[in-house]
């Protein structure tokens, strides 16, 4: 019997909030000759990261705790295994709320920057 006050989420939800903006930043220079496509790409990656952050927030707003299971990517990975240092992501309610705030804040930044630079520069 499962605990009804705990929501099981795949661990890649956590990683997508963190890694998607970096992936967009790595891909954006490839579209330097097409500023509209570059702007759209930056907004798209930010939107998807914000969406994953909001998906993490839904169980918390429903009064459930968040339990992460290792679906494809574990929530902790060895970084420097020789000395036992790991890199991982926390999944407590406070961290989820901060991840949501960062994801939505980044999305609004990219949308506003693409509107400001519509005539010339692109997303800075």
Image: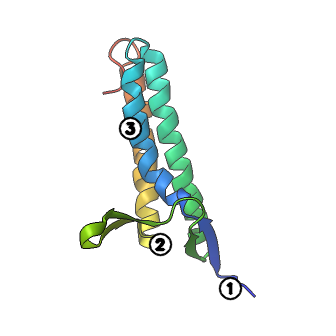
Q: Nearer the viewer, mark 3 or mark 1?
A: 1
Identify which residue is drawn at 31% across, 67% down. Answer: 81
Q: Position of residue 54 (x, y in %)?
A: 55, 56
- Name the foreground residue: 30 vs 52: 30
Q: Quadrant of the C terminus?
A: top left
Residue nearer the viewer, 112 or 98: 98
Q: Nearer the viewer, residue 27 or 123?
A: 27
Q: Earlier in the sequence, mark 2 or mark 3?
A: 2
Residue hosting label 3: 109
Looking at the picture, does residue 34 appear above or below residue 60? Answer: above
- Mark 2 or 1, which is nearer the eye? 1
Task: Decide if residue 60 is on the left or right side of residue 3.
Answer: left
Q: Earlier in the sequence, mark 3 or mark 1?
A: 1
Whole-angstrom CA distance, mark 2 to mark 1, is 17 Å
Q: Position of residue 25 (x, y in %)?
A: 37, 34
Residue picked out by circle 1: 3
Where 118 sits versus 16, above or below?
Answer: above
Q: Residue at x 44, y 22 (%)?
A: 38
Spot occupied by residue 28 in the image (x, y as percentages of width and height):
40, 27
Give the structural element (helix, strand or loop) at label 3. Answer: helix
Q: Secondary structure at mark 1?
A: loop
In three-dimensional space, the C-alpha distance between marks 2 and 3, rounded to whole angstroms, equals 24 Å
């Amino acid at each position: 019997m499962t605990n009804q006050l705990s929501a099981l989420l795949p661990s890649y939800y956590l990683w997508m909030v963190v890694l998607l903006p970096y992936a967009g930043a790595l891909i954006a220079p490839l579209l330097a000759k097409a500023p509209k496509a570059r702007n759209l790409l930056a907004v798209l990656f930010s939107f998807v990261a914000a969406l994953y952050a909001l998906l993490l927030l839904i169980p918390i707003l429903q009064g459930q705790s968040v339990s992460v299971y290792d679906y494809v990517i574990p929530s902790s990975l060895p970084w420097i295994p020789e000395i036992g240092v790991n890199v991982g992501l926390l999944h407590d309610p406070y961290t989820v709320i901060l991840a949501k705030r960062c994801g939505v804040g980044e999305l609004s930044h990219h949308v506003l920057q693409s509107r400001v630079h519509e005539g010339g520069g692109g997303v800075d």
